Image (cartoon, helix red, strand yellow):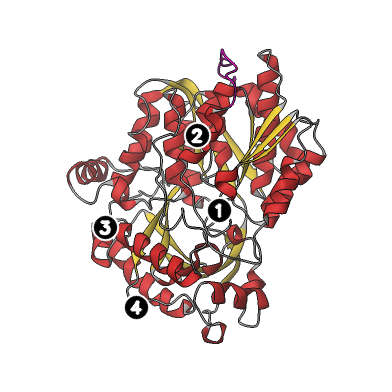
Amino acid sequence: MVSSERGRVEPAQEAHRELTAAHAGLAGDRVVAVNSTARVLVAAAARALRGADCADLGGPRPMSRFPGTPDPVRRAAATRAATRVALTPAQTAEVDAARVADWLVGQYPRRRYPGVLLGSAHGAAAHLAAALDMPWLPASFEMSVHWSRGAVDQPRAALDHGAALTARLLAGNPDVHVRQVHCPASRGALAGATVSLSVRWRTLPVAYRRFLADRLHPGGAVLLLRDARTWPVLDEGLGHSFQVGSPASGLEPVDFHPDSHALRQVLRSAGGDGARWEPPEVTAPREPAETGVDAGFTDSVAVWSGRHGHPLHRVLFPQPEALSAATADLYRGWLRRAGKTGDRLVVECGRLLDPWQVVRAGLVPYWCENATRRRVEGVEWWLAGSEPFSSVDVLPEPPGVRSPALAGLPQWLAVAAFGRRRRALDRGSARGYPVSSVPTSRATEVLRNQPYDLPTPPPLPVADALGALRDGGAAQGLVLR
């Protein structure tokens, strides 16, 4: 699909992809995994640009109202729910990444924007979108596919099954790379019932190109966010790579070694057996993790931006907290310049966020990627070095699994304790933590109870945002170029 000049799409091929996206394949909302971070963030950002909150996002997951449910019963219920919404192996041949891109851009209001955010899925991207009045579009999307004879403790079998699925998908989508992630630490028993495929665009999709050409103001900025974390990977150069574990698990690659005590704990809680764990050999010890951006996508964005006169700004962050902290500092300055206090903080986690309610209430948002100790320690360190906040509200998303890497409720309470006058840990999120689950709309319910702080500030100029990211992120290794 890509010509000799990287990122360029031939007219005949583009017309074919547009026809395919319009009339064939599965609908985008059927393909993209229901609870995937990118899906939730696009939905949240699109609602914020319409002046709407996330009250309609997500419903309770199985057993979420019964935190005392025995683990085997809870695992079985979660597995049944996951397989109901997962794709069948045959449906992978019907996936059209171009149609997914159409679905993603179609969620945003039809108007002009001062710029666009692209790249890695990070909650701060949705908050930057709300502050800058810009859409955010992911460089990849996640799929969940049935693995009827799967086992959480058999990564080699997962690799074989995922390779067969990927071959079907790549036959109709040569412009993507598929990263399969087998991580019982972050997915629990679901890693033995479904396979998780992260589909990365290797070039800017046609729908994205059309969206940028039609919706950006002349000279509008393009901000490319890139998660720079790496992970050991098996990649034989066939468009499919395989990854055991994930940086999002809160564990290190060595923790997925067969002799690891942490791995045995994880597998036992997921209904597996550490004695059967035999991961395949890796071919690349430091490849971009599934949270990264394909190099071809980055090059394609650069080519498009240069040709159409849109300045490109690359934002690289070594860990999620670098972008979270820089965005929180950015919000504080933005609110204060608008005459607000900037002294009320909300610490969000995972899918528990609502950018519109944050802006409506005049809050400073800090997003934790998940409930692992490492991510919670990140917000603790940032709070310890920041000007104190008068109030701190904490929304810990229960991951639905048990893992030695998870933060306990006392650590979350320690985060809330940084508030000088108000210290609040959401009880609904904490009930049954860590094995219960709550929908995204829970964040909306909590934030709706915050007092209004209207009018909302005018959109933040891009130059001011770039300056704030550069100043606030430099100490944590964030690079802006």
Between marks 4 and 3 in the image, the one whose residue lies nearer the viewer: 4
Query: Are the residues flagged by discs 3 and 1 in contact, CB closer than 8 Å?
Result: no
Q: Count neighbours of disc 4 (C-alpha within 10 A) and say few if under 14, some if 14 to 19, many if 20 or more.
A: few
Q: Position of residue 165 (x, y in %)?
A: 32, 68
Between marks 3 and 1 in the image, the one whose residue lies nearer the viewer: 1
Q: Nearer the viewer, residue 110 or 228?
A: 110
The residue range painted magenta reads 450-460
Q: Earlier in the sequence, mark 4 or mark 3?
A: 4
Q: CA distance from mark 4 to mark 1?
A: 28 Å
Q: CA distance from mark 2 to mark 1?
A: 16 Å
Q: Identify the disc placed on residue 444.
A: 2
Identify the image quadrant of residue 151: bottom left
Q: Count neighbours of disc 2 (C-alpha within 10 A) and say few if under 14, some if 14 to 19, many if 20 or more.
A: many
Q: Nearer the viewer, residue 218 or 192?
A: 192
Q: Which residue is mark 4?
A: 149
Identify the image quadrant of residue 91: bottom left
- Can the viewer see residue 206 in this picture? no
Q: Position of residue 55 (x, y in %)?
A: 43, 34
Q: Earlier in the sequence, mark 2 or mark 1?
A: 1
Between marks 4 and 1 in the image, the one whose residue lies nearer the viewer: 1
Q: Nearer the viewer, residue 394 or 286?
A: 394
Residue for point 47% across, 42% down:
440
Q: Earlier in the sequence, mark 4 or mark 1?
A: 4
Secondary structure under the numbered disc 2 in the rendered image: helix
Q: Nearer the viewer, residue 348 or 328?
A: 348
Q: Position of residue 406 (x, y in %)?
A: 64, 60
Residue for point 19% across, 42% down:
19
Q: Which residue is mark 3?
A: 172
Q: Which residue is mark 1?
A: 398
366 horizontally vs 160: left or right: right
Q: Does residue 459 belong to the magenta stretch?
A: yes
